Amino acid sequence: MSRIKYFLAIVVFFTFAISCSEQEDQSSRTFESDQGLSLNHKNEFRKDLIEVTEDIFVGVGYGLANSIMIETSKSLIIVDTLGSEERASELFADFRKITNKPVNVIVYTHNHLDHLGGATIFAADTNPDIYAQENIIYNLDNIATTIRPIIFERSARQFGIPLPSDEIVHQGIGGFLEINDQSTLGLVRPNKLFKDEIEINVDGLIIKLVHVPGETDDHLYVWIPEKEVVLVGDNFYRSFANLYAIRGTKFRNPMEWVESLDKIIELDAKYLIPSHTRPIQGKDNIKSALTDYRDGIQFIHDQTIRYINKGLTPDEIVAKVKLPNHLAESPYLQPFYGSISSYVRSIFSGYIGWFSGNVTDLHPLSPHQRAKKISELASKQTSIEVEAVNALNNGEFQWAMELSDLLLAVDSNNNKAKEIKSDAAEKLSMQQLASNDYYFYKTIAGELKDTFDVSATNNKVTPDQLRATPLKSIMRSLPVNLNAEKSLEVNKTVMFEFNDLDQTFTIHVRKGVAQLINKQIINPDIVVKTNQQELKEIFAGLKNVASISLAMTNGSIDVKGGKVKFLQFLGLFTD
């Protein structure tokens, strides 16, 4: 068996883009103050060996992550292995108080080291098969190799590694981090890889492993039909989904995560075991928790995209996108591990890149230049507007735009500030070698003076274009156009059937979220039957209320459940 040990914490960062720190076992400590973190949440990580159901045990609080033991008639299956040999040894000793059966199978839910670093302990005597989704190999070998120095530094800050142990309250998804240069990390590379899903039979127990990208692109869930148990790894835990880690991560696609959660909901599990925080029991409890989780992610995603399409900058979107009360109060959506504002910015960057859309941000002053300008401004005891005019007259066009933005942040209708920014943008356009930058400056200058309206330059959608567009693509665009404010009190399902397509779509508007369901459902509130083109033209805005009403009258759109209610439903997707 190949046995790999890592003794330096920096190697951990190099190979796995994760950072951890050795602290004392937090389960026995008390705090006089929560220092801004939730002490109640710390209870999630108290050390415990929990029997979830017959023959299935989860060790919580032994490390940052959980490890799960599944006992069959002849052997053991271990799902995730903690983050170090020391912690794995402690948990395995407690597992051995329950059974001495051999470990014949190990499953990695994903590539993060806190789930892999104790594998050598569980695999020491039996040379087990180790299962994982095939993307794990790339991630193990390549993630963070080119940016390892900055990942090391930022991870140290994210996890508070330099801090004294008495200042570590909890880590959001675990009580403490167990890995540093004093611990021994033992990884055994997986030898059983799959792409989409695989079913394995272990001593007569059927286990299904299914690829469900979310926190990582190599994520899987473990489903045990006989016991109605699902093990979800890090795609669910008692904290808002970590859509972005501030140590630095590649884009985590929120809607892939949502689709993965929808697959897990469909299992209708009786027991749910995450790889962080404690298990959940009861089908209704699990469905409610997972529904809150997927709705919270989709709400942040959809409303961020909605405001992106309105031309707002990341800072402006962060100020607007807040979870509605029913989601903000969910115990599963508290931002214990990451912040909603980080997720909004990650979605913005993931979809359209670093540039905010504000031309001032295209070529900003350096921090040193800006600091000097601000110091000079403070010493002059003059107004920002006067200084902006002076900057413009002195040829300091970038500084003039940055000052204008301050004025516009206070009053977006400040015509003088718009005039200054327009003039500065016009001047800066003449200094650009890159055509992209030249035209962006020129266009903004014209918009600020109301010379033209950029939205009027959009190509008009034609019926022929819509015929060539797959209906599914149009249906998938609906959720990001939902007006959350209008729909917060709405819980309504609308099912669309087609006389020219053997496919059904359902939209479930549920308190600010529009879930697209690619199938029929039982007892929808409204059923709409029409042809593809009719519906495409409605959603593309080619038909107004009058033409839709006429179509419902002449029968080209058949509505069961109330024509007025259908029009009200359509109104939820307009501002």
Image (spheres, helix red, strand yellow):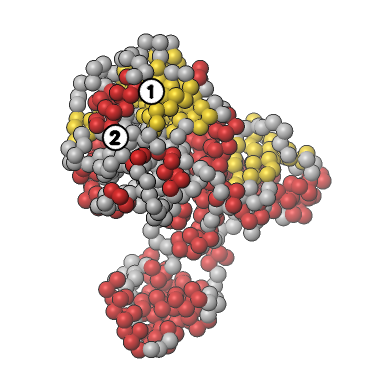
Disc number for residue 456:
none
How far across and down, in percent of the image, does residue 399 sit?
36, 78
Classify the position of the N terminus by image quarter: top left
Q: Is residue 340 visible?
A: yes
How far across and down, in percent of the image, does residue 149 sit?
21, 51
The crowd level at tag 1 (other Cα within 10 Å; few <14, some 14-19, many 20+) is many
Quadrant housing residue 492: top right
Above or below, 417 against 304 in this view is below
Residue type for callout 1: Met
Q: Is residue 197 visible?
A: no
Residue 561 appears left or right of 398: right
Query: Considering the numbered disc 2 on the image, is that residue within a helix, a strand or a loop?
Result: loop
Residue under label 2, please give it.
83
Q: Quote the CA–CA distance across marks 2 and 1.
A: 16 Å
Residue depicted at 46% across the width and 72% down the height: 444
Query: Considering the numbered disc 1 on the image, is that residue within a helix, a strand or a loop?
Result: strand
Quadrant housing residue 51: top left
The crowd level at tag 2 (other Cα within 10 Å; few <14, some 14-19, many 20+) is many
Residue depicted at 19% across the width and 32% down the height: 5
Residue 550 appears left or right of 502: right
Residue depicted at 50% across the width and 58% down the height: 308
Instruction: Between residue 516 and residue 67, name the one nearer to us.
Output: 67
Disc number for residue 69:
1
Residue depicted at 42% across the width and 43% down the height: 42
Instruction: Between residue 339 and residue 195, name the one nearer to us.
Output: 339
